Amino acid sequence: MPFIRIPKEHWGKVWHALIATGPISRVTLDYIYAVSDKQVKMLRRKNLPFEVVDTPDGKVQGRHHG
């Protein structure tokens, strides 16, 4: 199950596209959601802004944010 972060400034547009294609689950208060692979493909196809994160806490493993 992919986890994505939705940018605050684009939340409404991305959120509505996601709920139109199926259920999603909010994982953290930092706009992190669990979505399906189908939803990730749809977001890419519609060129909507989001970031895939590796863990539910929003951290991307293997990258240093310093």
Image (cartoon, grey):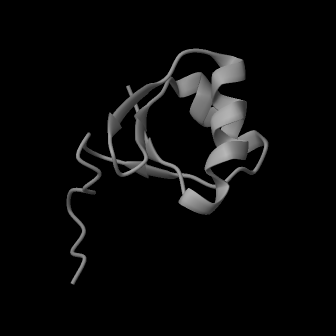
Q: Position of residue 32 (x, y in %)?
A: 39, 43
Q: How many marks?
A: 0
Relative to 17, say whether 61 is above or below: below
Residue for point 68% across, 40% down:
43
Residue for point 53% across, 26% down:
37
Closest to the observer: 53 or 22?
22
* Left or right of 15 on screen, residue 56: left
Residue at the bottom extreme of this rendering: 66
* Left or right of 6 on screen, residue 43: right
Q: Position of residue 49 (x, y in %)?
A: 64, 55
Residue for point 23% across, 46% down:
57
Closest to the observer: 11 or 51?
11
The C terminus: image quadrant: bottom left
Residue for point 61% across, 15% down:
22
Relative to 16, say whether 61 is above or below: below
Relative to 10, say whether 23 is above or below: above
* Left or right of 58 on screen, residue 5: right
Residue at the right extreme of this rendering: 46
Residue at the top extreme of this rendering: 22
* Left or right of 22 on screen, residue 47: right
Q: Position of residue 18 (x, y in %)?
A: 64, 29
The N terminus: image quadrant: top left
Closest to the observer: 42 or 56?
56
